[in-house]
Image (cartoon, grey):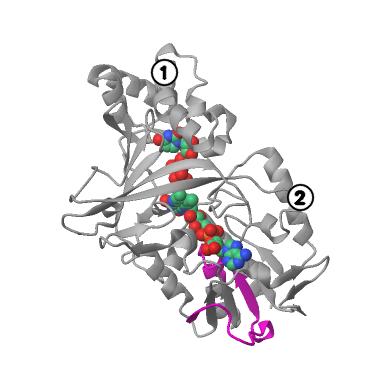
Amino acid sequence: MSIASGLPEGFNPSNYDAIVVGAGYAGAVCARMLAEGSSFRVAVLERRNHIAGNAYDYVDEAGVLVHKYGPHIYHTFDDRVHQFLTRFTDFTDYQHKVLANIHGTLMPVPFNHQSLKLAFGDEKGERLYHKLIMTFGENKKVPILELRKLNDPELSEVADYVYENVFLHYTMKQWGKTPDQIDPEVMGRVPVFVGDDDRYFPQAPHQGMPAVSYTDMFEHMLDHDLISVFTDVDARDLLDVEQTSIKVCGQAYGGEIIYTGALDELFNMDLGALPYRTLDMQFETLDQDQFQPVGTVNYTVSEDFTRITEFKNMTGQVVPGKTTIMREYSKPYDPQSSQTPYYVINEPQNIELYKQYRERVRGLINFHVVGRLAEYRYYDMDGVVASALELSNKIISQQ
Ligand code: FAD
Ligand code: UDP
């Protein structure tokens, strides 16, 4: 692999069989797959000054490994994704735990057996727990919106408690809407868990943190003789999308183009901007060993921020006397600003707008869109890797 900042003088796209826009999961997985599977010469164009997309991590001034674009915890049920990624990194056996700060009491989220006892006392909590087992079975995930549909008065009390104290205010802060007003799949990401597993991703067979760092994993993934990475390059300056063809640097391009950026940006948002939520991430280094007992504490009834992450608790890094924490403040994304579009807003009118942009690239046979931005989907890392593996395999099989 080579990594260069900017394009070299005389950069000629015809020297590459594929151009990949973006060096996050979607782009890096495709670049690696196409270099290996089809012996493609691949140019990866990344407009930031680093690889790894939103999973980028680095060591801050205090010597603490932090995640620049929010806390990233690897977890997957998908063996193919795990097999692919473990070629480029080992994972620690870190199991992510989250506590909700509910009026000063820290309770496990997803709300589980232990949370019930903390909220309702041992005796009543135990009784409610058995009622939940009778209703749903043991070790089951129950979306809060499902729990709210029950008619049993005692279980309705549980549903009301969890709705009010775990979901309502956090969701208002994160999305500016109540849980009933947003996509039920988003709420379903954090179910109530009828069981004792107190991990944030109960039952996920593969979870952990990269043994060194995410950025290190990406360096290995992109480390291939046929891959050249160019950072600080905005691909929009090079690409011209026409009705049935696409030009790169003003020339017709016959290779494959993998685009992992936002689709509306490619067309200067001429049909309107796709809406997103963005985050203000406020990092703070403290002169103490540890700030909180777990990786993340969610502030579900108080504060303007949604959660505080303490990176050392996730990475296991030992840095005596110093720790770095990060608070997340959510707000609407302004496409005219330099903000990062972090979360897609999965609402019918936004999906409709996305489809209109997508329609405009449908006729371009060598142009492919993949990833959280390009597919306008609320993907976790493993979902993006799976999608990129699928696309690459399709391209490879057509050679
Ligand atoms: P990105 O990582 O956004 O990469 C796209 C890249 O393309 C970017 O580097 C961008 O600069 C570049 N690009 C865009 N347009 C252009 C252009 N015109 N020219 C050149 N380059 C361009 N997932 C998990 O599994 N676990 C977690 O704990 C987790 N936590 C998260 C926390 C937060 C706050 C957020 C926002 C996301 C989290 N995710 C998590 C999701 C994860 O970040 C994404 O699934 C993944 O990073 C998406 O990869 P991607 O390649 O699709 O997009
Ligand atoms: N959520 C909540 N309270 C919590 C945790 C999550 O209300 O304590 C809701 C909130 O709407 C959030 C969604 O569940 O946006 C998904 O949470 P997740 O932790 O998966 O979000 P992410 O890590 O992707 O920001």
Is label 1 in a helix, a strand or a loop? helix
**Which residue appears farthest toward the right when viewing the image?**
243
- Which residue corresponds to the image point at 59% horizontal and 50% vertical from the top-left? 377
- Residue 342 rendering spot, x and y as whole percentages: 53, 50
- Residue 149 rendering spot, x and y as whole percentages: 52, 21
Residue corresponding to mark 2: 271
Residue 63 on the magenta span: no
Q: Which residues are magenta?
A: 1-30
Q: Quadrant of residue 110?
A: top left
Residue 22 on the magenta span: yes
> Does 37 sit left or right of 397 as displayed?
left
- Which residue corresponds to the image point at 39% horizontal and 31% vertical from the top-left? 300
Residue type at numbered disc 1? Leu
> Which of the pair 350/281 is nearer the observer?
281
Residue 260 seen in the figure: no
Residue 8 seen in the figure: yes
Residue corresponding to mark 1: 155
Q: Quadrant of residue 126?
A: top left
